[in-house]
Image (spheres, rainbow, N blue to C red):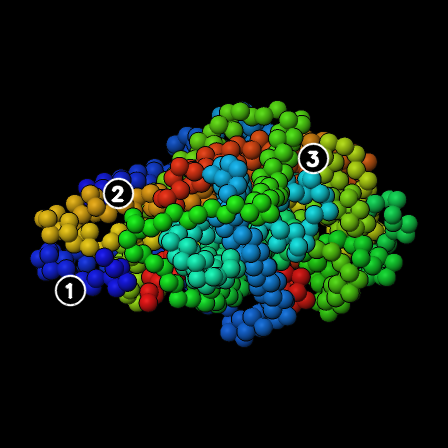
């Protein structure tokens, strides 16, 4: 069965025309609703920006400072993405192709940094090296924070490659470099670009690391304008610069993705990739992963632990426990809402390409670049008119869903795309209704990937700060707000217990994602920028 | 789908609940016993929570405190408008209070509220009152700075090249800059800022970061509030190599800022909120601020924090605090020169 041309609707005459079009209408309406929800921050920004006279807007957009900040942001994103591409793909390839000891366990330290918020990374590195600051430091922190995305995505791509192709390439006399560039890379471009996309968007929207390291990116500018000037219109105008930049970035990313030549032929017959035995490659792989694990896992844990034990202030266990429970429950709630919201769009994206689905998807992705403070204020603006809903955990969870929807839509659509259309057709032919097809056929195949996407939302929501500060119920503390309230680096000792718990709790789902025995059901980010073109 | 029905039911019941509670809270405050009060606090939990706890214990009223950055909370209140759940806003600085006042969201406080606070520390329209005083100082490393500046104008001189730190996003820095603009004109202020930039000034996010940077040796002088040297040293758990310095009397660099509080017009518990302000400005609480947070009491003749001159002996410039809350021009200038 070829999936190169997804079966158009017309070719599935199984269900009655009425029920099918009814289903389609419900689906489109649901996607429309999701589109409307993800529009909230944009509409808010538009309303705020329009408070400012046009000449002031133009002046603000083209002043030297704006251009400088844009240049800083662009260079930061470039550096982080390039480092990600080189190191991430290298580490993933090493893990996939080279016969190293404890190969499956080595995945864990390369993914574990996902559990550590960028501001905790920064705190720990500054605690260790007091002069740690500036652009290079920001590149370093944001790279180690985001490389796991690209490693996970690349590994998923590599695992879907048929090993027999590599055998063929070798027998035709291609050297390893040629094999990689001509046979392997073209097949994983989609995955790699998806990882790069997430890393880039993360870098754009990060506030914690860059602000602590004195690097002024667009997000820092926006936050500063809110903080310092009560000038919500100026902040909104700068937000549009960020949006424009993220659109450019998403477009540039499409070029990495290129024309994906994913081969989805009969996976069950594929040959396992033979492992490389060369000693120098083994040593190099272990050294690179070891070095990465030291800077991205061991150092933060070491600093957190020493700070935890040297903390002179008595630990408030009650507040530690309640903050942990609050964090986990509201983040899980947010991940659940994101899961529900992403289902219709993911389903639409997994099928025949449609302009509506693609545009909605792009919007969701661009919203991912917005700083938490923007989404937070947009929801304050609307939420405060909702009476009892305002400052409830529900609204906070909803904010998480909007902020991180891109993550769950991405994994939803690619997981659903793994379900061959033929199987759905057969099920329908056998008399199953749509709901039964979803439950009995689609869910079992797509569930693991969707689960990973949901876990990713959960993980990021646990670490979220700016929107949490605004939207949480009064008096409701999460681990992130507790770390924040300890405020500055000189009081990091007091924040250490909260940071440590946050990292440990987040490590559990992170471990689940990297679980060695679940390697086949891994990420598939291929559809991140909309359904990929297939030859 | 049953789930969506359940969700709709849940939302509907939530809305009903809020409607009911809104009705009950809008009834006469005196008639119903106030049992809770919602405070948006721009002052950090560490320093203000003991005061709140004391008030809760003495009145039996529970405080729901929302901690945050003063300016961010102020942006939030502006965004909430007439729907704000806040009863009282306690702010680190006059600027945030001024923004709320300008938007017409504060009620006018009656004359018996904070009656012992001198008029110079109260907004003329009585929208908010000062609670504690903060002196602007230059913090410096005594071993590295041989020639102390006598005026903020000195800071653009080459002897301080690459040694000065400021926090342009910080509200108290902006209050100082507002005073500079009000008194010397905006072209003077602009020249001064550009002079600083040409002198290799370093930018920090907040005052404490400046003091930390002086201690680390990154810079030698910084424009901050007086109490940060205690805050940083207590946080680090050791003495630090940083001292407070004042400019010559009357210099704008010696400005006195206030933290303050105002009651939201939309609050149904204004009387209780004013009681809380009265407590914070009572002699006992004021003395507690001096000893615990190293701030100045605003009550005339009160003891200053350890090792510091009396409030009226600092040589602060005579500035109407009301003019300091008008910071639009200040921010436009900071944006213009690229410091924001």
**Chain of the residue under the numbered disc 3 shown in the image:** B
Q: Which residue: 16% across, 45% down?
A: A436
Front: mark 2 or 3 = 2
Q: Tell me the number on the disc at residue B235.
A: 3
- Residue A494: which quarter of the image? top right
Q: Is residue B40 visible?
A: no
Secondary structure found at label 3: helix
Dot 3 alpha-carbon crowd within 10 angstroms: few under 14, some 14 to 19, many 20 or more: some
**Quarter occupied by the C terminus of chain B:** bottom right
Q: Residues within 10 Å of mark 2 (few under 14, many from 20)?
A: few
Classify B328 as above or below A141: below
**Would residue B137 be found to the left or right of residue A387 on screen?**
right
Label 1 sits on residue: A10
In percent of width and height, residue B68 lies at 55, 43
Mark 1 / mark 2, whichever is N-terminal:
1
Locate the N terminus of chain B by quadrant: top left
């Amino acid at each position: 069965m070829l999936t190169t041309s997804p079966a158009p609707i017309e070719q599935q005459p199984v269900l009655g025309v009425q029920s099918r079009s009814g289903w389609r209408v419900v689906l489109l309406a649901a996607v429309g609703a999701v589109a409307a929800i993800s529009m909230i921050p944009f509409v808010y920004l538009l309303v705020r920006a329009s408070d400012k006279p046009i000449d002031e807007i133009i002046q603000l957009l083209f002043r030297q400072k704006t251009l400088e900040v844009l240049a800083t942001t662009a260079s930061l994103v470039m550096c982080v993405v390039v480092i990600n591409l080189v190191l991430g793909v290298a580490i993933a390839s090493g893990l996939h192709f080279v016969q190293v000891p404890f190969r499956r366990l080595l995945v864990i330290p390369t993914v574990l940094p996902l559990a550590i918020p960028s501001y905790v990374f920064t705190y720990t590195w500054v605690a260790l090296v007091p002069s740690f600051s500036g652009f290079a430091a920001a590149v370093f922190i944001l790279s180690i924070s985001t490389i796991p995305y690209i490693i996970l995505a690349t590994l998923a791509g590599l695992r879907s490659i048929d090993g027999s192709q590599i055998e063929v390439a070798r027998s035709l006399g291609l050297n390893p470099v040629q094999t990689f560039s001509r046979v392997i890379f073209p097949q994983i471009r989609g995955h790699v670009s998806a990882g790069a996309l997430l890393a880039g968007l993360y870098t754009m929207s990060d506030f914690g690391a860059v602000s602590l390291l004195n690097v002024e990116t667009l997000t820092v500018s926006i936050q500063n304008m809110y903080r310092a000037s009560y000038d919500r219109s100026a902040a909104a105008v700068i937000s549009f610069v960020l949006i424009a930049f993220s659109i450019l970035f998403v477009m540039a990313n499409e070029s990495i993705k290129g024309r994906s030549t994913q081969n989805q032929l009969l996976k069950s017959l594929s040959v396992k990739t033979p492992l490389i035995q060369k000693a120098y490659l083994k040593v190099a792989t272990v050294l690179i992963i070891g070095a990465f694990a030291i800077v991205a896992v061991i150092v933060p844990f070491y600093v957190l632990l020493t700070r935890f034990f040297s903390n002179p202030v008595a630990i408030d266990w009650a507040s530690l426990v309640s903050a942990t429970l609050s964090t986990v429950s509201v983040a899980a709630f947010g991940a659940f809402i994101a899961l529900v919201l992403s289902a219709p769009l993911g389903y639409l994206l997994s099928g025949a390409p449609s302009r509506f689905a693609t545009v909605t998807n792009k919007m969701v992705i661009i919203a991912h670049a917005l700083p938490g403070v923007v989404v937070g204020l947009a929801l304050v603006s609307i939420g405060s008119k909702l009476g009892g809903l305002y400052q409830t955990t529900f609204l906070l969870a909803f904010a998480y869903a909007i902020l991180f929807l891109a993550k769950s839509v991405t994994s939803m659509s690619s997981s659903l795309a793994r379900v061959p259309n033929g199987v759905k057709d057969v099920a329908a032919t056998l008399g199953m209704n749509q709901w039964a097809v979803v439950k009995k056929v689609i869910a079992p195949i797509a569930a693991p990937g969707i689960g990973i996407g949901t876990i990713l939302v959960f993980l990021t929501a646990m670490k979220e700060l700016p929107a949490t500060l605004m939207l949480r119920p009064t008096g409701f503390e999460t681990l992130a707000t507790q770390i924040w309230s300890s405020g500055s680096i000189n009081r990091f000792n007091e924040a250490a217990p909260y940071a440590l718990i946050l990292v440990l709790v987040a490590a559990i789902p992170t471990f689940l994602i990297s679980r060695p025995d679940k390697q086949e059901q891994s990420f598939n980010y291929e559809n991140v920028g909309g359904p990929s073109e297939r030859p | 789908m049953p789930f969506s029905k359940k969700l709709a039911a849940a939302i509907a019941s939530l809305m009903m609940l809020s409607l009911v509670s809104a009705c009950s809270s809008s009834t006469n405050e005196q008639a119903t016993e106030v049992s809770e009060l919602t405070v948006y606090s721009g002052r950090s939990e560490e320093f203000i929570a003991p005061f709140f706890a004391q008030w809760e214990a003495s009145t039996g009223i529970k405080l729901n405190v929302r901690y945050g950055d003063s300016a961010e909370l102020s942006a939030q209140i502006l965004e909430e408008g007439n729907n704000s759940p806040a009863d009282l806003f306690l702010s680190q600085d006059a600027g945030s209070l001024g923004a709320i006042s300008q938007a017409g969201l504060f009620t006018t406080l009656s004359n018996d509220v904070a009656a012992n606070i001198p008029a110079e520390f109260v907004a003329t329209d009585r929208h908010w009152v000062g609670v504690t005083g903060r002196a602007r100082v230059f913090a410096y490393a005594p071993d590295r700075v041989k020639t102390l500046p006598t005026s903020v104008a000195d800071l653009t001189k080459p002897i301080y090249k690459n040694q000065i730190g400021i926090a342009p996003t910080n509200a108290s820095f902006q209050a100082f800059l507002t005073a500079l603009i009000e008194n010397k004109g905006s072209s003077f202020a602009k020249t001064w800022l550009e002079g600083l930039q040409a002198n290799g000034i370093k930018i920090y996010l907040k005052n404490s970061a400046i003091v930390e940077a002086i201690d680390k040796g990154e810079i030698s002088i910084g424009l901050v509030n007086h109490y940060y040297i205690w805050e940083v040293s207590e946080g680090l758990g050791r003495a630090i190599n940083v001292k407070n310095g004042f400019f010559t009397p009357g210099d704008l660099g010696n400005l006195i800022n206030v933290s303050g509080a105002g009651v939201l017009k939309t609050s149904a518990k204004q009387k209780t909120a004013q009681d809380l302000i009265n407590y914070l400005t009572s002699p006992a609480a004021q003395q507690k601020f001096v000893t615990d947070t190293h701030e100045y009491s605003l009550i005339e003749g009160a003891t200053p924090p350890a090792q510091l001159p009396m409030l009226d002996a600092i040589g602060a410039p005579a500035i109407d605090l009301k003019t300091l809350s008008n910071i639009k021009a200040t921010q436009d200038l900071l944006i213009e020169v690229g410091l924001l």
